[in-house]
Amino acid sequence: MTAYYDKWSYKKKKQPVWAFFKAIVAPFNRVKEVVYLGEQLPKKCIMVSNHNNKKGPLVFEINLPILHAKWGAYWMLGGYKERFHYLRDVLYIQKNGYSKIRATLKGGFEAIFSLWSYKGLKVIPSFPDARLRKTLQYSMTVLEQDVSIMIYPEDSGKGYFDVMSHFFPGFVMLADTWYKKTGEDLPVFPIYYGRKSKKIVVGKPLYVQQLKEQGLNREEIAEKFRLEVNKLYHDHFLDVSDNAKNKNKVETK
């Protein structure tokens, strides 16, 4: 059986079943507000955000005003066994610290319908190896249809944290690839979703080519965005009432 990620393509056509499911879960995933620190999100851009465990993609799908595809773990676009092992071994045991029994039950159940939900969320398979070129190829197809892309570049190998310690530069490579083909320096928006406060903050856009002109390489640009996204957390979500500010020092650029 061919994995879905080997035949992935972006389809704009409506998905009635997914639309019905989204309508059911939307009331439980609405945020109280979406705050823009600068301009509104344009029709076509790149967005870089925290993932907030597995909650973020659905919340962004429901609350952001623009149509967008999302990068996601390619295993979740494979067969049932591939999805199950990713959910059990990586998401629940490695990243969330679940017991094997709990992770097996939860992962086994969710793997049944996860492919359908990932397709509904328009997830682009993200590869951690040389196959990243496929991710970039798929993403270019999406951008060519004037649809935005959201990427979660945090290193979540040890779990998901409010303050992120490292960003992978795949989104910088995407912006570079688009620029080389079209000459357009796409705006890249830092975004943060706070689950407890039910709020999304959209920061001011930065431009990869402008940052390269300042002498920054891909890793340094990724680090620049990590600091920007973390700053959104510190400025808009950090609860100082429990001394959190003393535990999480604000990073400086």
Image (cartoon, rainbow, N blue to C red):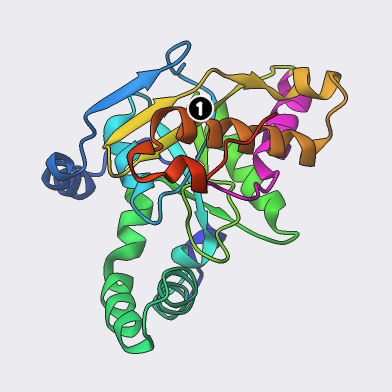
Extreme residue in the top direction = 39
Can residue 25 be seen in this snapshot? yes
Give the mark count. 1
Which span of residues is magenta-colored?
163-182
Please name the predominant secondary structure of the magenta segment in the image.
helix
Does residue 8 appear anywhere in the picture? Answer: no
Q: Residue at x 49, y 74 (%)?
A: 94
Q: Name the residue under label 1.
A: 145
State the residue in front, 99 or 68.
99
Question: In the rendered structure, does residue 171 fall within the stretch colored magenta?
Answer: yes
**Residue 108 appears left or right of 170:** left
Q: In this view, does 53 lie to the left or right of 131?
A: left
Residue 180 falls in image quadrant: top right
Measured as percent of width and height from the top left, residue 237 is found at 38, 35
Residue drawn at x 62%, y 49% as measured from the top left: 135
Q: Picture coordinates of residue 246 (x, y %)? A: 50, 43
Residue sticking out furthest to the bottom: 101
| Residue 137 screen position, x and y as percent | 65, 43
Rate crowding at label 1 as few (under 14), some (14 to 19) or many (20 or more) other CA atoms within 10 Å. Answer: few
Q: Is mark 1 on a helix, strand or loop?
A: loop
Q: Is residue 15 magenta?
A: no
Tell me which residue sits at (49%, 73%) in the image: 90
Quarter of the image with the C terminus in it: top right
Q: Name the amino acid type tagged 1.
A: Gln
Q: Nearer the viewer, residue 77 or 101?
A: 101
Q: Please name the residue shown 31% across and 80% down the image.
A: 108
Above or below: residue 150 compared with residue 18: above
Residue 207 horizontal/vertical position (percent)? 68, 20
Towards the viewer: 26 or 244:
244
Looking at the image, which is closer to me, 8 or 34?
A: 34
Q: Reply above or below: 132 against 26.
A: below
